[in-house]
Amino acid sequence: MSFELFLRCLTGGLALTVVLLATPASAEEFEITIHHAELQEVKISPHVGDTISFVNHADIAHNLYLTYEDGQVETLDTQPPRTIKRTVLKQVGHVVVRCWIHPIIRMELDVVGK
């Protein structure tokens, strides 16, 4: 192998290493179970970009929504029994999860930055 080819390979390898080191950490996924009229109590520390999966183990439909600290609301639409709804957390701050159909269902999260 010529020295010039060796340098090209070495330079390409270094560039690849830099790209890999600059890649952001992967997001986490959390799973929360919905029982009849309550959300599973969990202690999680989610970050912006993490995914939360809500698994409906109840025999009734639910319709969860998230309210962010700035008032933005994200609805996950109707969730029939034995289905999963996913959301990616979009903002830092306090988030309240509730059900449009069953207002007694409530969960609070504090989302932090990466």
Image: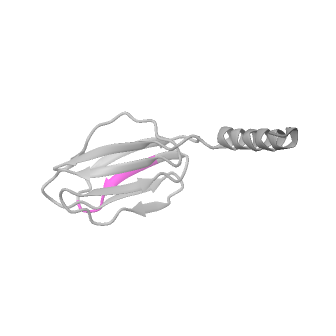
Residue projecting furthest to the left: 59
Residue 81 place in picture, x, y as percent: 18, 58
Q: From the viewer's perspective, is residue 48 above or below residue 70? A: above
Over which residues does the magenta segment extend? 95-101
Q: Residue at x 58, y 42 (%)?
A: 113
Q: Residue furthest front?
A: 1
Q: Which quadrant of the figure contains the C terminus?
A: top right
| Residue 1 x, y percent position in the rendering | 80, 39
Residue 109, percent across and down?
42, 42
Give me the residue at 31% from left, 48% from top. 106
Indicate left or right for 25 with 44 as reference.
right
Magenta span main SS: strand
The residue that appears at 26% across and 56% down in the rendered structure is 103
Q: How many marks?
A: 0
Say left or right for 15 vs 90. Answer: right
Residue 64 appears in view:
yes
